[in-house]
Amino acid sequence: MAYYIENVLNGPVLSAKRPIINEYFLSSYMMAIYDGCEFGCPYCDGWSYHSRPFNETVRIPINLPDRLEEELEHVDRGDVIAITSLTDPYQPAENIYRMTRQVLRIFADRGQPCVLMTKSHTVLEDLVLLERINAQSLAMVVFSVLTVDPNLSEKLEDKSSVPALRLEAIAALRRAGIPVGVAMIPIVPYVTDTDMQLNNTLRAIAAAGANFVFWEYLHIPDDRHRSRVNDMLARIGRYPPSYYRDLYGNRVAVDDMYRHERDLAVLSRCDHMGLSVRAPHRMYAGKVRPANEAALLLRHTAYFDTLQNRTHMAAQGRALADALYRGTATEEMIAASPLSIQVREIMRRATPDELR
Ligand code: SF4
């Protein structure tokens, strides 16, 4: 068990408003509940941002709910807040401190749209609050699922809920009408990226009824992390570090050719299984600020344009998305978009400020 240290938060709870919308989490703001994560998954980027092992000491910001209430006075009720920052909101500390529950209660009282990412089935304990928020705007849960192989999962994320429990929680949330996404983050090269792994994982996610999926590949931000990843690979047993030298060199992210090839492999499986890639428009339509809705629709379309090498279309879509989000789009920009009819329809619901 980790040490829990109660402390008083002096800085802001919410991040600054994002200059562009987050197309994975539909969000304009990010926040973390705890500082540190007892789950301590060996591949987590969180290790690189803490000087002490971030799974051994978890700080509990006891005044976070009060500060959040004050900050929310300055936040638009159509902007999504994402609880996703390198610490799980349903790690064991939540059983004692219930900070996540207090935050959801505040969101429920305001109808503030939110998304939270977790590896824990215990999110179901807050189902009533999620339902309250979702009845007013949007409450979305994103589960992190790397693999559904229990033996492999034990080597990658042994402290979190086993994959079967996460899949059951996805099904339970969907039965309750809560939108659920799955983040295959990270796809670990040579470990969870094989055709067999992808088939099994995506099939299980689709069978559980998730609304959508997205993915990103393992990052290796520094040498300390590289050696942690090498230890993890050694525990898994079949993957020599030399494979990673070919794929990463000294870079943080995987080789572009590998990424493109695997992106298409995941995408074609999702198409085959009828699993949406990125949140489908119907899921957030009318539930977030109109400018955000239009920006998300355009950015998600641009993502597929990029994958299919329609680079110019993708750049144009992103530029319009960002301008709408910031309130600087011109009529000419909208008219030039292949999605102009949908964009205009969405923006008809916008406030004068958003149409500026
Ligand atoms: S549960 Fe998430 S935040 Fe916590 S260590 Fe694992 S990957 Fe990092």
Image (cartoon, rainbow, N blue to C red):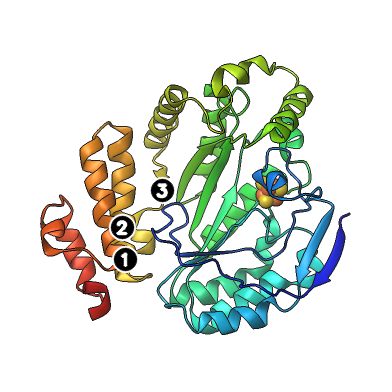
Quadrant of the drawing holding the N terminus:
bottom right
Residue 136 on image: x %, y %:
45, 78
- Name the front one of labels 3 and 2: 2
Q: Amino acid at mark 3?
A: Arg
Element at label 3: loop
Q: Pointer 1: what residue?
A: 326
Q: Describe the element under mark 1 as helix, strand or loop.
A: helix
How many residues crowd around disc 1 within 10 Å: few (fewer than 14), some, or many (20 or more)? Answer: some
Q: Which residue is mark 3?
A: 278
How crowded pointer 3 is (Cα within 10 Å; few <14, some 14-19, many 20+) is rated as many
- The quadrant in which residue 43 appears is top right
> Considering only vertical position in the picture, is 172 above or below 183?
below
Quadrant into which the C terminus falls: bottom left
Which residue is at a point 29% across and 45% down the rendered structure image? 302
Q: Tell whether 45 sits left or right of 202.
A: right
Question: How far across and down, in percent of the image, does residue 187 sit?
Answer: 57, 34
Q: Residue at x 25, y 36 (%)?
A: 311
Q: Is residue 351 visible?
A: no
Q: What residue sits right under mark 2 in the picture? A: 322
Q: Amino acid at mark 2?
A: Asp
Mark 2 burial class by Cα count in 10 Å: few <14, some 14-19, many 20+: many
Q: Dividing the picture into quarters, in which one does residue 240 lie? A: top right
Mark 2 and mark 1 in contact? Answer it, CB < 8 Å. yes
Residue at 85% in and 64% down: 4
